[in-house]
Structure formats: structure tokens, C-alpha cells
Image (tube, rainbow, N blue to C red):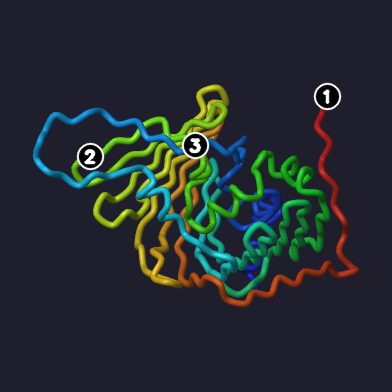
Amino acid sequence: MIKLNFEIYKEKQMSFRKLSIAAGIILLMGLQACHTTKNALVAETKPNADTTKKEVLHAEDFLNKNISWNTFNGKAGMHFEKGDKNQDLTCNLKMKKDKEIWASLIALGILEAARAKITPDSLQAIYKIGKTAYVLSYKEGQELIGAQVEFPVLQRLFIGNPLISADVKVSKFEVLDTTVKITQVQDDFTQVLTYNKKNSTLMQLQLTSAEKDFNCNISYGNYSAITLQQPFAFERHVIIKNKGQEIKLDMDFSKAELDVPVETNFSIPASYERASIPKKSK
């Protein structure tokens, strides 16, 4: 039965090869920007005529709750859907802030299908089904997966922080009954963050660009305290609509550790064939 399932998986894996370059990059297909800029943090608020004493909230109270970390070690079940294709994988994920992302994708619960190591300058990946490998610059890696995603944005995604930096100016700050909403605009992207008013945890992130016909919604849940009692969302549900195509990804973390030693060793067997980026037809 394992052998039969493996053969079925092998057929599927060939069509999914490009989509599994590294765990989670697939959900950023089409995300085109989020450059880091340094602007003053400004919150727009409306005057309140009510003289009743109320707690005064500011955008910084929530944006400053971002997870603080240097290294990350985690494991997550992933369910991916695109069109009529779907796949279930387990991802072992290790990161060094601003330096490395290491990921191993496990199929059928026992078989390592792919492994990748990403730095701000490079992307390396091996596919055990088919014995192929990629050794690319980070820019070439962006071309391969069809996404202009900056390295810091990718790490923010995995750790559970907002995709656009907290340093970017706040254009709108709304205080509602049980939530607060923070809007930031960067280039032609608008990010709307919804936080739980009581405990300051991020509940939902929406990133849109009308110009690029792009919409990304991420919902966060099942929070639990990890290192230094920092709340971590063990569940993520992602829906991306990009130029008429829809991608769905569910991530269910079973392990998440911060600031622990992580090994990110990566090697390519000599027997693996080096693959190149397919040339675009003119």
C-alpha cells in the first residue's frame, strides 16, 4: 500500500515541483512588493466629544506587539489548493532572522519530497522525486516561483508578523467594539490589520493591490504563548487571488520555538541533475 501510494504521489509531485520550491513560498505566488521603507508612524483619529473617561488606544500599542525573535524552529501541516490540484504536506521549518530559511517538505507523513535553503542572496532546492536540484540567485528564485517577494517579507509571513513593516506610516486607525483596524499603504499595496482589542493578537491581515489585481487574506487563530510568553498563531488560513487565479493554503503548526539553536545544513548529491529556469517564450 505504501508503494502504491508512493507511485501516485510521484505522479502528482512532478506537476507540483515548481509549487513546492520552499515551504510556504507557494502562498506568495503573485505577491509583488512590500519594500521596507522608514517613515514616521502616524495614526489618524477623530475627535471624540464623549467626556466619559475611556482607555486611549494607539496604533503603536498593537504594531509593537510583533513577535521578537532571532531563530525559529517549527513544524506545520500544510494543505494547498490551486485550481483542481490539492496536496497535503508536512513542513519542517528553521529560520535565522535576516539570514536563512531552511525547509523540508514531507509527503505521506514519511517521505521527504523536497528541501530548500533560502538566503537574501540565494535559493537552493532539491527534489528527491526525479533527483533534480536548483542553485539560483535570490532574483532567479523569484523568477522561478513567479513572485517578487523580498526575503524579510517571507520571514514575517512564517513567523506571523504583518507583511508590511511596522515602520510604514499608518493611514487609518479604527477602534471598534471588540477589535481595532490599522491601515497602511505602501507603493500600490494596502494592508489592513485586524487585532483583538482585548489581548492585542493579530486576527486577520488583508493585503490588496487594485493595480495588480491582487488580494491576499490571512486569518490567524489558536494562539498560544511560546518563548518569553509571546503569543504565536498556530493556525493560519490563507486565500490569495491573483489575476483571476485563486490559491488556498492552510497551515497548522504542531511545534514553534524561538531563539533555540538551529542547524540549516544543506547539500546537493552529486547524482542530482541541475535544473535551470525555463525560458519565457517571446
Q: Quadrant of residue 144?
A: top right
- Rendered position, 34 above or below 90: above
| Mark positioned earlier in the residue sequence (3 or 1) | 3
Q: Residue furthest right?
A: 270
Residue wearing tag 3: 40
- Rendered position, 204 above or below 174: below
Residue wearing tag 2: 176
CA distance for labels 2 and 1: 51 Å
Position of residue 128 measured from the top left corner of the image (x, y, whole percent): 75, 66
Mark nearer the viewer, 3 or 1: 3
Q: Quadrant of residue 9?
A: bottom right
Q: How many marks on residues?
A: 3
Q: Which image quarter holds the C terminus? A: top right
Within-10-Å neighbours for mark 3: few <14, some 14–19, many 20+: few
Residue drawn at 46 percent across, 43 percent down: 239
Name the residue type under label 1.
Answer: Lys
For the residues labelled 3 and 2, say whether their Cβ atoms are less than 8 Å apart: no
Residue wearing tag 1: 282
| Mark positioned earlier in the residue sequence (3 or 2) | 3
Asked which secondary structure carries label 3, the reply is loop
Within-10-Å neighbours for mark 2: few <14, some 14–19, many 20+: few
Name the residue type under label 2.
Answer: Leu
Mark nearer the viewer, 3 or 2: 3
In the image, taking residue 134 as reference, residue 23 lies left or right, namely left
| Mark positioned earlier in the residue sequence (2 or 1) | 2
